[in-house]
Amino acid sequence: MHKIIFIHGLLGSKNNFTYLEQTFPEYNTTSIDLIGFGNEIKPSIKYDVNDFIISLEQKLNLGNHSDTPYILVGHSLGALLAKELTVKYPDRVIKSFLISYPFLEKSEALRAYSFFDRKYAEGTWWTKMLCRSEIFYQWLFYPFIYLFKFKYRQSYIDAFKHTYQSAHGAIENTIFKDNKEKLHRIAGKIILINGELDRSVDFAFSNHFNHYMIPEMGHPFFGYEHQISEIIKSNIQS
């Protein structure tokens, strides 16, 4: 049986996929924490694509001679990494579902980001300070999380489980340096799943591939697990 691997996005964790995984009771599924995020180790590295791929290769035993076929489901940063794994291991990855792929070039992304996200990506001194001192104030967000985001509370709490180096490094050295043209090399293996309201999507570029649009969904996918599950299952079974 194919094994489905879920790879989270920036500031995410394996808990982001709790409810999506539950829609696949008949499949062998695994969600993983990326290096630098969630409960994974957070070493002082660049957090470029090579760092992430080496860690994923070790987790998935991609360097051995196993013939276990994988189906990858990645969100945002995780979608980018799923693409890289599919390019590198076309014989092991039979299909990749790329949710909210971060298409935009650095200049375009910075214009699309909110003020705080833009300053964080630029690495301003005060965003460094906020990130490195979040242990002292993150509890202030907990009442909001438990009142309004209770279902996804662990995902929102896990969003604080990173370092400035892992978060900013992933943005600057992986997301902003991505080559989306590689998608053409694996066009037959990928399915893009975009949110209609996602400002990081290049819709014209997406038209070159098998892609689905989910109305009213933005960049996060919380609340749209069943729609995403239906897309994945229909393409696995076809």
Image: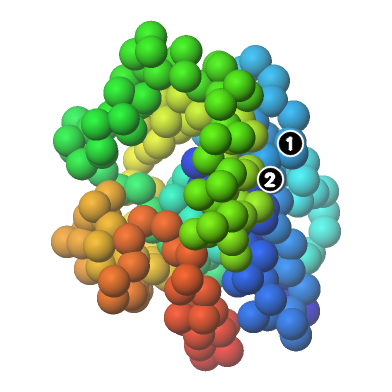
Cα separation between marks 2 and 1: 6 Å
User: Number of numbered discs present?
Assistant: 2
Identify which residue, 203 or 149, lies in the foreground: 149
Identify which residue, 87 or 53, lies in the foreground: 53
Per the image, label 2 sits on a secondary structure element best described as loop
Disc 2 vs disc 1: Cβ atoms closer than 8 Å?
A: yes
Res. 40 mark: 1
Name which residue lies at 28% across and 58% down: 198
Amino acid residing under circle 2: Asp
Which of marks 1 and 2 precedes in the sequence? Answer: 2
Amino acid residing under circle 1: Glu
Q: At which x and y percent is residue 225?
A: 52, 74
Residue identified by numbered label 2: 33
Question: Is 163 situated above or below 3?
Answer: above
In the picture, measured across the screen, residue 138 lies left or right of residue 29, that is left
Q: At which x and y percent is residue 13?
A: 63, 47
